[in-house]
Image (cartoon, grey):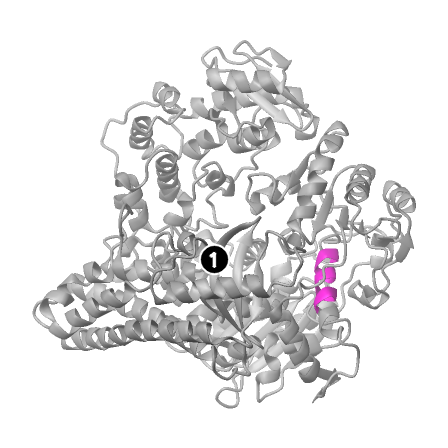
Amino acid sequence: MTTPPSLNFPALHASHSGIWLTDGDGRVKAISKGEAIGRAAETPLIVMNAPLLGQRLGYGELSGLDLLELFAFVHPARFMVPTAAGLVKVLGIDFGAADEIEEHDIPLIYQAAAHKLLATLADPAWPEREGAWDSAQALSRLRWPWAGTVAQHLKKPERPERWLFSRLPEWEEVPPRTAPRSIELDNTDVTAHLDHLTGEGAERRQGQRDYAEAAMQVFAPRASDKSPHMLLAEAGTGIGKTLGYLAPASLWAHSAGGAVWVSTYTKALQRQLSQETERIYPNPDTFKKRVVVRKGRENYLCLLNLEDALQGGFAGRPAILAHLVARWAAYSRDGDMIGGDLPGWLTTLFRQRGVAALTDRRGECVYAGCPHYRKCFIEHAARASLDADIVIANHALVMVNAARGREQNGRPTRIVFDEGHHLFDAADSMFSAALTGQETIEVRRWIMGPEGKSKGRRRGLAARLADVGSYDEEGGKAIEAARKAAETLPGEGWLGRLQEGAPWGQVEQLLGAIRTLVYARDESGGADAGYGLETELTDLDGPIVEHAAKAAQAMDALIKPLIVLGKRLEALIEEGPDWMDAAARARMDGALFSLGWRIDMLAAWLSLLSRIGGPADPDFVDWMAVERFEGREYDIGLRRHWLDPARPVAETVVKPSHGVMVTSATLRDGQNWASAEIRSGARHLDRAASHFAVESPFAYHSQSEVLIVTDIKRGDMAGLAGAYAQLFEAAGGGALGLFTAIRRLRSVHGRLADRLAEAGLPLYAQHVDPIDTGTLVDIFRDDPRACLLGTDAMRDGVDVPGHSLRLVVMEGVPWPKPNILHRARKLYFASQQQFVDGDETVTAPLKTSSNTYDDMIIRGRLAQAFGRLIRSRNDNGQFVMLSAAFPSRLLTAFPEGTPIRRVTLAEALQSVRSGLSMDAKPLDDSLPI
């Protein structure tokens, strides 16, 4: 293969097995690390993923002609796995099969890819041409490395190009949707619709049909207020639960004229749901109208922030990112920057956190006061969901909307919580409160705006509501009082002042006292050196109680004028004075919502401060914490969590609904429904929830195996790394290694990488490679010989076909971290856990060991990790636990019939090498999950 003469840049590739460089004439040679660094410093080189390459060379400042940046410019909003094989597939490069690519060929592939991408710029049929010329000119002024080469291949348009913000479509107001009709679904209709969705000739699966019929009950009219139909449904992997609940859901939505919200926890399931619903609405235009994907505001591109970035708010590399994001925004399906069609790898190419500044993470949205409001991606999604049949959302958004009540007109009456085993954790995060330095400084910025050398479009409350301050005396006084009160909150440099023992203001003084007390009470003995510390809010001395009282006075001085301002805004919006034009009304409406949010937050802080020196609230767990990462402090403060976060879920989300389904492949703890009742909030309802369970159709006795290795000593990092290496080599790749600590993951990675490279097995690692988690999984999925290391929390994000995942290795039992919150819940649920026997539910204290709550959590984690292995009837794989002391009581986490053996490492290696014999006849590999 030769390189076109029009492109003479050398290409560089480096991996754990070597470094290769090709010149402009297509000759490839292996070079040393020092030579590679020297060439990169003096000559523009074609590379892919410069941060990753720089890390592998030990040259963090490496830059060059990054193919990923060029791809993002030429094909914005197009998916690509960021590997040489990914380039070959997407660009159609003639280089044989992806699994035949040798590492020394990769520089040639880079050059061919660059040539193909640049040739696309001159192609009259290039679909992403509009806007490219103006973008290239702007990038040239920013000295983008590709700018000169792009300019040589890109023809100037005959007519001026439309500016991004004039090209985006506007949403239109529509009349409110009428309330859904009260209907009863018929079994025959539901099963017929399910047969239609699964397709003619598909295998008839009774488990799926039973599941769909059970799901019907949540769509029945409820008998009384705040007594919804609630169903807890466990469907083993392979049942086809997605279509099982979509069949009655879509039938009800069509017949009743209402919307069903399907809520997930992971982005992977959101993508799967979007694909599955295409079966219901095969026409693209109908699909776009009837199915809407919703996420939290912080996931979407903010057009006002982007405009500010494009007009000078960003400089240097972040400015280049902003222009590439603008290219993407023009072609994006929905403006979703986190898990949508913005390539996850794009943002990791830019070292500064530019992406966060392009979304609405601070609650600064001015809503109708924004000049781009009618084009806003968030508003597009929100309005489209009002008239949709199926709204695909996430647990956090469902809870936020229910708690804050901004979208009351579109509040769902029927909700399906898929990945329901995560509902408790999502609620724990959503309904918590944190009075910390990071949180208080955000409130200060929201009120006061930029201070000192701060840049950007951020404006304080007075600037956003200048007309109120000018025309309404009471409102103006409230704004000024809030501004003065906000000056007592922590400002820039607060953490440094605390570390130096020189806090400023009442709140900083409290945070300083908390920091001192937390360190004084630390009894870890350095076991968690470098990571967070915490202590309980008990036995507090006089000084910290005094600091808390002063901080409460400061908070009270802030919340009072904000409440007054909120009342004035409500009155002004209602009165409509002469000076209030449409823009002013829009700004006030947006500010009113933001005010309500901040007032609720401040009220929670005041309640938390009253706890210091006062009685404990039995519904909450409160503690003091110093947050650290790798020895660096980044936040300090007070934290409050619900003892049972499922309770506010029941009150704010479930009870107002008419029907709620909570479903998962691992909802129960073995055969016991107690964990499902606890973690879903069902036990807080007056009307008992119904239960349904159907087992997986997979033959786990012949498709899988659990091996517990007994001869790896605890704490032996060399032995642990050696075990991982040998197991991965024995499997020939397709292996996922899960860890309970980042430090051990990194230590093992450092010992594994070169060894696996010599065996031809690519190794990728979370918390090591400068690649986002979603992209790491995409790379892993695309290469059957790849190996991936991640923390235990990664287990739910890995959804890959069986040929790419054949082995899961865990370093040890994923015990819950024994922190203050966990200890409190362990004691609480030990006295509250429900025992369920058939249709009878009885609440009684636990009569088993004190580890019952821990075991429930661990078995759930193990079940989820094991569930990654077998995704179809043709899959087979092994689950290896490197823990000699693995408790037998946890073995019920694995599906019934799964072979489980305690073995030596040598025996485990022999088993992995030999693989599994399939006793069952392989069937259709397309079974839905």
Q: Position of residue 165 (x, y in %)?
A: 27, 45
* Residue 436: quadrant of the picture: bottom left
Give above or below for 379 relative to 618.
Answer: above
Give above or below for 425 relative to 808.
Answer: below
At x 74%, y 65%, the residue is 859
Q: How many marks?
A: 1
Q: Which residue is at the front of the view, 178 or 343?
A: 343
Disc 1 residue type? Answer: Asp
Q: Which residue is at the front of the view, 858 or 90?
A: 858
At x 26%, y 59%, the residue is 448
Give above or below for 690 relative to 806.
Answer: below
At x 54%, y 9%, the residue is 25
Q: Which residues fall within the magenta stretch?
A: 857-866
Q: Position of residue 909 (x, y in %)?
A: 87, 43
Q: Which residue is at the front of the view, 240 or 513?
A: 513
Magenta: main secondary structure: helix
Q: Position of residue 45 (x, y in %)?
A: 49, 19
| Residue 576 in view of the camera | no
Q: Indicate left or right for 649 with 803 as reference.
A: left
Q: Quadrant of the N terminus?
A: top right
* Residue 607: quadrant of the picture: bottom left
Q: Which residue is at the front of the view, 920 or 845?
A: 845
* Residue 120: quadrant of the picture: top left
Q: Which residue is mark 1?
A: 635
In terms of secondary structure, where does tag 1 sit? strand
- Local crowd at mark 1 within 10 Å, few (<14), some, or many (≥20)? some
Q: Indicate left or right for 585 with 216 as reference.
A: left
Q: Position of residue 4 (x, y in %)?
A: 50, 13
| Residue 634 in view of the camera | yes
Q: Quadrant of the C terminus?
A: bottom right
Q: Is residue 859 magenta?
A: yes
Q: Is residue 928 magenta?
A: no
